Amino acid sequence: MTYPIFPRCNRKFAFLSAIAAVLFLALAGCGYDKPGEAQATTAAQDKPAAPAAAPAAPAAPAAPAAEPRPPITAGDAAPGNADGSCNEAATGELPKEGATAPAPGKKGPKVKYLAGEDPEYAKKHGWPVKYPPPLPGSILPYKRIVAYYGNPKSKKMGALGEYPKDEMLRRLKGEVAKWEKADPSLPVQPALHLVAVVAQGEPGKAGKYRMIHPDELVNEVHGWAKEIKGIFFVDIQTGHSDIREILPRFEWILKNPDVHLGMDPEFNLIKSGKIPCKKIGTYDAADINYASGFLQQIVKKYNLPPKVFVVHRFTRNMVTNAKNIVVRPEVQMVMHMDGWGPPWLKRDSYRDYIVKEPVQFTGFKLFYHNDTKKGDPLMTPQDLLALIPKPIYVQYQ
């Protein structure tokens, strides 16, 4: 069923930092790109395994001094976009209770490693994790996936829709080349990551605060991925729908061996009943286990290679009971650090929400615009390769 176009939600938020203790909340746009208003929220809370250990992380080199951090200031109101979305609009910086950032001009205490780069910290929390031996045809850990994210119906949701098709594919190839040069030891697999179900700021006829894009659009973008010998991700933002109702609808495309899944807790607001883009949503391990179980059934039913399953995360409460997430041989789990901000804050969030609660593989998102909007540099492949564990899924928005 095709739903009318209502104001849509995308993208994205920044996140809590343990060291700077700051919550960056950037609300994704509701509407084909319609002005929205961001509202701050709080976050609080959350593997089974099998034989065969993932490759051990190499020791990190001697540490540089910690990056200077900006003072915490009251955030500006979210400006929104001209056509209406809250896409990539931010409420600003919210200090965590009881924490302060270094005063301007003063150096913080020296540390041996930057956040997210300490091998002892990673080891303490269970890295490298143990998981089932990769089945034949597995992408991970034999390749690094480099993906463009978004929707071709919107220029504000990410790189996938910001540029005309040919230019977008050319740019993605450029990022793939950078990663191949930065880490020649690991082949790079290009990918397109399409938001096929988009959260909405209005209930719509179904009253579910989400829009399911037509199959024709999904097929079209899948075809673009094939043109560059890439893989394809279907990403789902449920709004007020249950993932158990939405996911089976996409079996028709997931039965292809080159099609994989993304699931975004940020836009699952059933429990709170709140409107997308006004609050951050959440998934429990039980929801994630349902989705991975569904993928497992598809792999077995159609005799496919394992599916890659990407779960977005940038706050503690976006994924609850993470320790109960089941790792299955047929499904390769990627916990994906999805928030935006300066490099030090992204490292902090990677440490606090990804490294601290290991599942299987890790991902990291880079925002061309939001990461750099305050003058900070976009993190490079070399920056991400210094993290432990090294992200094996890298997404550009």
Image: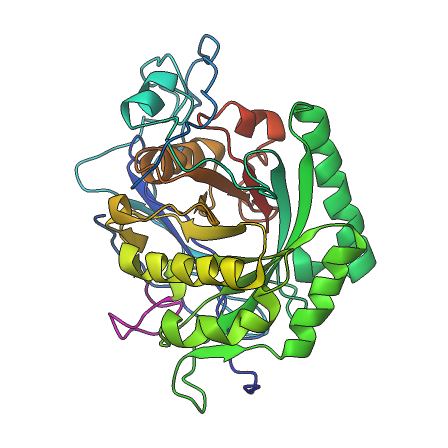
State the residue in front, 40 or 312.
312
Residue in the image at 61% along x and 44% along y: 137
Residue at 32% x, 26% y is: 103
Q: Position of residue 166 (x, y in %)?
A: 82, 57
Colour basis: rainbow
Evaluate whether residue 35 shows in this view. Answer: no
Q: Is residue 1 above or below residue 280?
A: below
Image quadrant assignment for residue 373: top right
Report which quarter residue 66 is drawn in: top left
Nearest to the observer: residue 25 or residue 380:
380
Image location of residue 204, percent across then percent down: 45, 87
Q: Is residue 313 magenta?
A: no
- Name the residue at 40% across, 47% down: 328
Is 276 magenta? The answer is: yes
In this picture, which residue range is highlighted in magenta? 268-280
Residue sitting at the far left: 98
Image quarter (top left, top right, bottom left or bottom right) of the N terminus? bottom right
Observer-nearest of 376 and 227:
227
* Pick the front one: 361 or 167: 361
Q: Main secondary structure of the magenta part?
A: loop
Q: Is residue 341 visible?
A: yes
In the image, taking residue 286 as reference, residue 331 lies left or right, namely right
Q: Which x, y percent locates residue 90?
A: 44, 56
Residue 226, image x, y percentages: 76, 57
Tell me which residue sits at (48%, 33%) in the image: 343
